[in-house]
Amino acid sequence: MKKYFFALSLLLALPDMAMASTALSSAGTDISSDTVNTAYNQTNAEVCPVTPWVTDADRYGHNITLGDEFVYPDTGLKIKVTQVTSDNKMSAYDVEGPGYSDKSFLNAPEWSRVVQAASSSVNAPCLQISSEAIIARTAQSVMQDTYNLKNFGLSLDNSQSDKENMETVLNSLGENAVVYIPKGSNWDGLLPDNPQKKLTYIWGARQTGDYPPIPGDGDTSVMLSNGVSIEYQNKKTSFTYPFTSFYWNKNQNFTGPWSSNYQQYASGLFRAISGPTSTGNTSPIQATLSSYGNNPSGSYDVGLSLNAQKYGQNSMWGLVIDLNDFSPKSAGAFASWNEYDLWAYGQDIKDWSPDYGNPQGGHRSLFYVNGHSLSPGGWSANKQITVSGTGQDDLPEPVVIGVTASDGTDYVWYATQSGTTGSQEPVFPVPAKILGSISGDTLTVTKVSSGSLSVGDSITGASPVNVVHIVSQLSGTTGGTGTYKLDSNTESAATNEPMYSVPVVKDGTVAWQFGQEKASTISSGMFWTGDAFDFISAIASDTKITQAVLDTSVAQFGQDADVIRMAPGQRLDFSAQGTLATANRHTLSYEASDSALEYKVGGQPVVKVEDDHTFTVNDGNLFINNGNSLVLQNKGGYTNVFLYVDSEGNLTYLGGIGTFKGSIVNTTAAPSSSQASCKAGQFADDASYHYACIADNRWKRVGWNSDSW
């Protein structure tokens, strides 16, 4: 099927809910007897695009075939070929488009559904615009644009009998008919048996109740009383959006935030003002979802669904919420908040479940963050590849493949030239990774992390935005650091910009450009910046946590990854009790000035572990529990020395020969007899004797010589 497009500007008017449109005529002759006059700001006379409308071929030499369409983009008017002769001549056509969704007027005798027979005198349908600002249409066709239910003799008083009559009227209308319920009508939207067709209801009145029913399956209601309301219901028919707003930005002259332009060009604007005398709750948009479904694994109801897809190099945000408090007065209650609430019954993971206590997203998550790598398809032989254009009217979605290079790394490549791939997979090289800058048509390479550069290579990365190619090397080590001439002077890259240098791969008639590594990384799951925070995160006193504030026990960590990374002087506080007065009494921090990890009480170091392994206890005791030993390891490789205190308070030394510097004072009392209680190895002294316990409860003594040392 071929499509033909012709530019023709028409201005349409909507008088009292009846769509006026241009008249279709046979061979330029008006077929209507009754006319409706509508003023247009048009000065051109009758326009009949006869040239492209020939019987056997179009102006490009293509034969007319069944289903060919002739479209006027400015109006949406479409004329479709519905019948052709054996020699490819158009013998019938039909009219489609927004202004002619109801084609019953073609049943009139003048049209007879088949408008013209194939003959030497076949003429195209003629769009007739009069310079006298008069447009001729049949009164019947005007009435069929929108059906006013009052014109069918209905009382619209919401009585049962009136509903039955209304159902008869609606059943007589065509599919997708537009029905108008005028002001002053009283109808709750219910019918004895809804018509089995799609209808659009335009209400000058308004239904009552919080959830007014929409008459039928796939029907749409547009209410124009007390504001505008658009309602749609779907039972068995295919889904369609009840309201669509679309905007395509093709303007090359718009500027962004770097030019101090923060205006967002959007497909819709919702704005609300809470005035100085207001007392209510004001929002520019209110989204409410009521979910009654019972299909938990297969259905996902979403209160607000946002989807952003990035194909080019524009900066992109999925969601931007700006709060600006311009009031010069002190902030009051809830002055500026972003709030996420979840109210529910019962435990999420039951405490008798085997999964209880395991780190998991569970069935309820107040804030869920997900980040993964995309997985493109691989290379295929003899495959047709079509590369989209990059013009103003194009939507260039890249054709991407995943390739494993000889270094074992998975990379992505994208097609830059349409064609058919070869019968054998080409070699996709490992890219050279470089640091450098681009100014004008000169690339300056300051470091080559891996690989080497060659003439003809593509230079790509976040910058330059558009790929450039090496023409020649101007200076430096061949294929290494130095300067290179590029084939373009319109790109730039700042100093030490990470870039790739890699040749284009020819594959059959397709050209592949290197993209980047397949495995993605995300710099931060959540990033904070600003100079006005008291707390980045605070947990209220009524919060009950049954497991942990942070659990990374099942996470996979890279070699250099940490759970928490802190700078010297930053503290962990262990004693705060929800008040500033109790904060920072017991802290742990690394102090660069002392080269030590320090535990402080009241700001003073109590325990220090220095970088040279020195362990210091300030103004306190080193306490070791009963039965535990203080192990002193000999650096020379000799036997370790153990010191411990037994249950009776005796200090026991185990190891090699002990050497002590300083004084050892023995306070053991002298025994009263040789059978006094003692442990083997104990000793004591008094003015007359030195006592030694040679076995449990058995003492020996030796007297002092009073005449000499």
Image (cartoon, grey):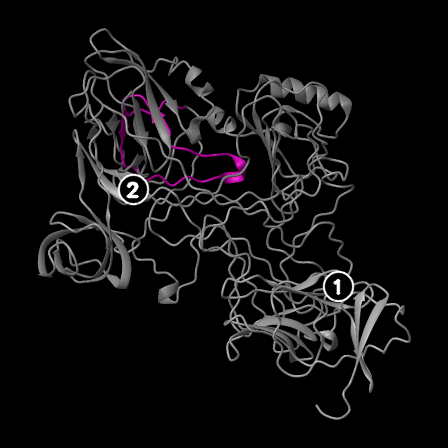
Disc 1 from disc 2: Cα separation: 80 Å
Q: Which residue is mark 2?
A: 393
Q: Which mark is residue 625?
A: 1
Picture residue at 44% right of the left edge, 56% below the top: 264
- Quarter-wise, where is residue 696 in the image? bottom right
Q: Nearer the viewer, residue 680 or 178?
A: 680
Inspect the magenta stretch and tell me whether residue 27 lies in it.
yes
Q: Nearer the viewer, residue 389 or 232?
A: 389
Picture residue at 69% right of the left edge, 79% below the top: 602
Q: Which mark is residue 515?
A: none
Inspect the magenta stretch and tell me whether residue 101 lies in it.
no
Is residue 400 something that shows in the picture? Answer: no
Q: Magenta residues?
A: 3-32
Residue 92: image location, x then y, percent = 31, 14
Describe residue 338's horizontal placement relative to residue 395 as left or right. right
Provide the secondary structure element on which disc 1 rests: loop
Picture residue at 59% right of the left edge, 55% below the top: 284
Residue 578: image location, x then y, percent = 74, 69
| CB within 8 Å, label 1 to label 2 | no
